[in-house]
Amino acid sequence: MATVSDVPVPSSRAVRPSARRPLLRKLWRRPPVIAAMVMLVIFIILALAAPLFAPHDPTALIPGAVMRPPSWQYLFGTDELGRDVLSRVIHGARISLQIGVFTISIALALGTLVGITAGFYGGLVDGMLMAVMEVLLAFPQILLAMAIVAMLGPSLTNAMIAVGLSAVPVYARTARGTTLSVRSMDFVEAARAVGAGDGRILLRHVLPNMISPVVVLATAGVGIAILIAAGLSYLGLGAQPPTPEWGAMLSESRAYLRNAWWMATFPGLAITVVVVSLNLCGDWLRDLLDPRLRK
Amino acid sequence: MRAFLVRRLFLLVPTVLGVTLATFLMLHLTPGDPVTIMLGEFASAADVARLRVELGLDRPLPVQYVKFLARALRGDLGTSIRSRRPVAEEIAERLPPTMQLALAAEVLAVGVGIPAGVAAATARIPAVDSTVVAVTLVGLSMPTFWSGLLLILLFSLTLGWLPITESQGLRALILPAVTLAAPAAAVLARVTRASVLEVLRQDYVRTARAKGVVERVVIYRHALRNALIPVLTVAALQFAGLVAGAVIVESVFARPGLGRLAVTAILSRDFPLAQGIVLVVATMYVFVNVGVDVVYGILDPRIRYR
Amino acid sequence: MVPWRSLVRGAMFVVVALALALPAVTHAQPRTGGELVLVSTEEPDTLDAQKTGTAATGLLMRYLGDTLVTKDLKGNFTAALARSWTASRDGLTWTFQLRTDVKFHDGTPLTAEAVKASIERALAPETKSPIAGALFGPVAGVTASGPSTLQIRLKQPFAPFLDNLTDPRAMILSPQAVRTLGDRFGRSPVGTGPFKFQEWRSADRIIFARNPDYRWAPAYAHAGPPFVDRIVVRIMPESAAQVAAFERGEISVLSVPPTDVRRLRATNKYPFFSFLRKGVGLFMEFNVTKEPFSDIRVRRAMNHAIEKNSVLQIGLEGLGEIAHGPLPPSIWGYWDGIADYAPKYDPARAKALLAEAGWRQRSTGGALEKDGKPFSFVLFAAPIDTWRRSAQIVQAQLRAYGVAMEIQTFEFGTLLSKLRAGEHTAEFMGYTYTSPDIVQVWFHSSNIGTGLTFTHNKDPKLDAMIDASRRETDQTKRLALYRDIQKYIVDQALWVPLWTNTNYVAVQPNVDGAKIHPDGFVVLNDASLK
């Protein structure tokens, strides 16, 4: 699966130094990023208040409304059982948000824990932890997720766990990197000399420095998580019927492609729009926060 | 040079071992008793005992691992529970179509992505650059299981140009290869663009320009050659990712291949088969990565002396 | 004077007449050559007729093998590998006179010894035959009393005997091939049929080639080898892909999924056959050893709770009939009073029964609960489109009662193993069979764990009724026995029968001579390409 986080895209040919205040001014120069942020806000609102916005229950079978094309009554049409596709897409947003938050939380929590521990204590602990991480990184992410689902059984929860776990090594590596670089800085020596404990150093120095790389990772990461989880659901390894998860909806639409093109179009469009928006914001954040590009 | 090679290959062994260990542990980390998982709760005592002995589950874990490894090195990956055929045979049967697809996608990704990236980086009109950036953004955000469906809808169902039912031959390869290649091409285009931009900014390029050599020659001879090294690395690394991505594309186009086999194995809780596939693909992945590293080291002397 | 003009005109007339008549004459002789492409949603688990549990294999065995006895196009018994047969007065000894000109695909001759070996293999416990072994019934012994005389002695009269012998899974296998190939026989079977096995490309296709030595076809087909060179069975799990392939001309004969029947018929391009499936197309079956369906009141409640007409209309596009009991109207032995006898759709009654069993809703629209545990169960099913749709409809209907049904799909082979092992609480299943003896297959306790009694129900009373129906040779008495069995099964609410579909088979216009056999398969011996 394509990862955006490895590919810095220089936003323009010449890069200007950035500071906090011109942040908004930078934003105005990038209308696509504004649009992306708006989309994400809409996505989050729809996700959080799905029952309010969805005209129908996403699993309700509307009698006599089987496979209707998009119309004023059913904006996205209905599916093979007579369910309103628009309502399902909106509820699907809620599930996608859950996926994004859940998987990134797992990856962040575990990854940071592992990475900081490895970076801080070094030596054997570092070697062993990172060896495990390297082995996990040796697997392509989707394969790792599939293997975890193979162990736990197909379900949406297990798919989320699988995707979360498969993302841990990347966060661990970043956390370790930051920890190492902070450890070697002078002020840490100074702090220790004054008698600051490990915990304090962690909190006041390591964690703040980790925020920017992690934020960049996370924005892309949510997009990837949604894509992989949807992919697992598409294969039947994730969300099960009648859950209105976007990947599962695409899987169902395949059999009716000829008769009902709308069943495939709208869920896929939703995924793409969300992931594009996440990637745009991720790119922009990286431009903002990545010290390498600050020349 | 030799030290570098030795160092790199030295790292290969523990990684592969780690991969085999992780795969081996798949069965044992699964909640529940392995045999029950595979045969069900009400299996006859005779079957349970037989499977236990067959898999060596009555021996201590390290012993099991060693036996697993020894068998794997001999090419014996166990027997599929579903089909009662050797796992290695099932994998060997399904590997060619997947490889075919991954190769075709790789060719497409390289053939389209790299020129697009170069064009974006060297274009005089900023619109070209923006278009490439925009298109690649969508390309790597679109799930393959959607783009594939759309392509089927357009080219097979509406226009009727391409088949959706043949599983072999060149015509049947076109749509799946395009679908699989799209995100890879998008990433490759971006990497190329970034790499070329980076190189174009560098001193020796400016020097060449100052000498008055024709702009084109500057670009193609000096910049491209250096820009392409990291790009080709990424392209090669992508291959293994394409094999993994084939899982989904095969499902969309109903192509028989390793991906579909893996999904069936997981859905039927056919552990020996699932394990075997994970092992083969992951090991291949490791080898490709190390191989690319080595080649990169040969091509770019700066890396070797780190 | 020679009337040249008339002569020439006359000659021209003759020439033209001949020219018009000749094609008609030559067209009477079917063209040999070419291949027919069939398609199957599921891949066979094995091509060993005696070891298979999938229906797909049974269908393919019609082309690969022959049985001792078969049925003609009117459904009457007719000769196949056995020229004639007699039964002793007590119904215990059956003597078959075999044809002497039959050879297996590997060249070995079909002798009584060979048939004996084949049947004994089906019966042997080591073979663990899920279906084939049970077909022969309570066999005491098989003897080859002459080079082409076979005797089968039964322990007790077995009414379904002859019927079962026509099942394709009772086909005669080459004992020589079984010996040489061992376990590999299932991937490379050897029979006596009009086609012989050529190749099996996993998950892709199975290819059969014409058997040029074939001369022993039953009376409903021409005696010689088939006209086409090959049959290719494509494996395509997706019915949408099958239909698309058919419309592009890539498939010769297609069992059309309900979603496309009306559209394809409206094109008027394809000859269509239709017949009511010989079997209940879909039923929900309960594992009575597990909660919550161990309680008969709950099972009965399910029968009242599900509104079957919606399932038929939405799941099947209305192309079939609602099923009420374990037998469909298309199988002899069906009791036509079952429609009235069976539980009707009655939500109030369903709720009352559930309440009686201790299940209550704590809040309106909330989950049904008993002792603090919610009513939720997993339904196992196979990835068949009509099943998937029907399952979701049932799921939605049950939700209104506070019942949470989860659907888990398994590929057919895996599904069967899990059901055999009793891992399920409830499952979706369907069947195709030719005789009412199917009740033994589904409900007799001797099949628990080895056969298809997925209810895991041990009921001596039902067993006795089924055994009696197998012993009774008087047809009128048999009908009464089957009536009682159907009533009992419905009383016990072991199933919720849902629907029986009408099969629609479409054929390419360039295919000639394909016939539908009343047992529900396409006869291809006489098929040819125009």
Image (cartoon, coloured by chain):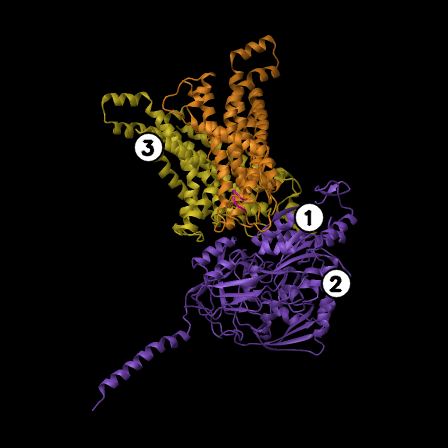
Chain colours: A orange, B yellow, C purple
Same subunit, labels 2 and 1: the answer reads: no
Spatial CA span between label 2 and label 3? 79 Å
Q: Decide: marks 3, 1 in contact (CB < 8 A)?
A: no
Q: Nearer the viewer, mark 2 or mark 1?
A: 2
Q: Which residue is identified by label 2?
A: C463
Instruction: Give the SS element for disc 1.
Output: loop
Q: Nearer the viewer, residue B19 or C444?
A: C444
Spatial CA span between label 2 and label 1? 25 Å
| Residue type at numbered disc 3 | Ala
Q: Nearer the viewer, residue A9 or B298?
A: A9
* Residue C402 visible, this angle: yes
Same subunit, labels 2 and 3: the answer reads: no
Q: Nearer the viewer, mark 3 or mark 1?
A: 3
Which region shows up in magenta? A73-78
Q: Is residue A199 above or below residue B60?
A: above
Magenta segment, principal secondary structure? Answer: loop
Q: Nearer the viewer, mark 2 or mark 3?
A: 3
- On whether residue C306 falls in the magenta region, the answer is no
The mark nearer the N terminus, 3 or 1, is 1
- On whether residue A75 falls in the magenta region, the answer is yes
Mark carried by residue A292: none
Q: Which residue is identified by label 3?
A: B119
> As drawn, which residue projects farthest toward the top?
A194
* Side (left or right) of C245 relative to C431: left
Q: Nearer the viewer, residue C510 or A209?
A: C510
What is the chain identity of the residue bearing mark 1? B
Q: Is residue A292 above or below residue B37?
A: above
Q: Which residue is identified by label 1?
A: B41
Q: Is disc 1 surrounded by few (<14), some (14 to 19) or many (20+) residues within 10 Å?
A: some
State the quadrant of the C terminus of chain A.
top left
Q: Position of residue B147 (x, y in %)?
A: 45, 42
| Residue type at numbered disc 1 | Glu
